[in-house]
């Protein structure tokens, strides 16, 4: 099976990595689709995010990283995905994610959305939280892959250097 995991990934967190790693085992092929989201002001360009994800997932078999603009269902069709993968950190994510799943299903009734709960140790993570901590020089090495931590450090010129 081919799972499409869409998101802005700005930046990629260990919570995202947790889902990608587990999905690769469950589904075989995972297409990480980086959205150039016009409603968000990204810290990193789409190209930088793709580089970060490719570097962070290089050890995994069956993971492909692509960019897309527009509808997730169109991206899924373009890449022959069998399902859309979405992560849930908390109940507060569920209502929004369910609305997206219903919307996607209304646009393409052949595509299922599969929800995976993030592992407990990553349930507090969000890209926004990571950027906020990095902006103020906090330790982020337990929140993001090493390359992402280095990029955030350069971006925010913080004193933190990951191990």
Image (cartoon, rainbow, N blue to C red):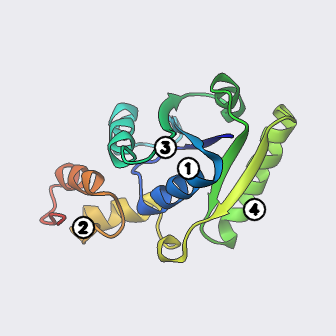
Q: Distance between the residues labelled 1 and 4?
A: 26 Å
The numbered disc on residue 136 is: 2
Answer with mark 2 or mark 4, whichever residue precedes in sequence. 4
Cα distance between the residues tagged 1 and 3: 28 Å
Name the mark nearer the viewer: 1 or 3.
Answer: 1
Q: Give the image location of residue 162, x and y in percent.
A: 19, 64
Left or right of 27 on screen, residue 110: right
From the image, tell me which residue sits under label 1.
24
Is residue 94 depicted above or below 78 in this figure? Answer: below
Q: Looking at the image, which is closer to me, 83 or 61?
A: 61
Question: Given contact means CB atoms under 8 Å apart, are the residues at marks 1 and 2 in contact?
Answer: no
Question: How many other residues sit within 10 Å of disc 3, few (<14), some (14-19) or many (≥20)?
Answer: few
Query: For mark 4, what is the residue?
Result: 95
Which quadrant is the C terminus positioned in?
A: bottom left
Label 1 to label 2: alpha-carbon separation: 34 Å
Q: Nearer the viewer, residue 23 or 67?
A: 23
Q: Earlier in the sequence, mark 1 or mark 2?
A: 1
- At mark 4, the secondary structure is helix
The residue lying at 86 percent from left, 37 percent from top is 106
Q: Residues within 10 Å of mark 4 (few under 14, many from 20)?
A: few
Which numbered circle lies on residue 107?
A: none
Q: Mark 3 points at which residue?
A: 40
Point out the tag, 1 or 4, that comes first from the N-terminus: 1
């Amino acid at each position: 099976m081919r799972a499409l995991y869409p998101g802005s990934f700005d930046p990629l967190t260990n919570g995202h990595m947790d889902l990608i790693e587990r999905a690769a085992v469950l589904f075989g092929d995972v297409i990480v689709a980086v959205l150039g989201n016009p409603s968000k002001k990204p810290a990193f360009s789409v190209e930088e995010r793709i580089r970060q994800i490719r570097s962070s997932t290089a050890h995994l078999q069956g993971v492909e990283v692509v960019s897309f603009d527009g509808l997730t269902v169109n991206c899924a069709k373009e890449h022959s995905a069998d399902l859309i993968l979405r992560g849930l950190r908390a109940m507060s994510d569920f209502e929004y994610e369910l609305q997206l799943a219903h919307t996607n299903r209304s646009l393409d009734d052949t595509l299922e959305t599969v929800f995976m709960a993030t592992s407990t140790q990553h349930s507090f993570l969000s890209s926004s939280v990571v950027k906020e901590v990095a902006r103020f020089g906090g330790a982020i090495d337990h929140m993001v892959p090493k390359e992402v931590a280095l990029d955030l450090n350069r971006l925010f010129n913080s004193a933190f250097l990951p191990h």
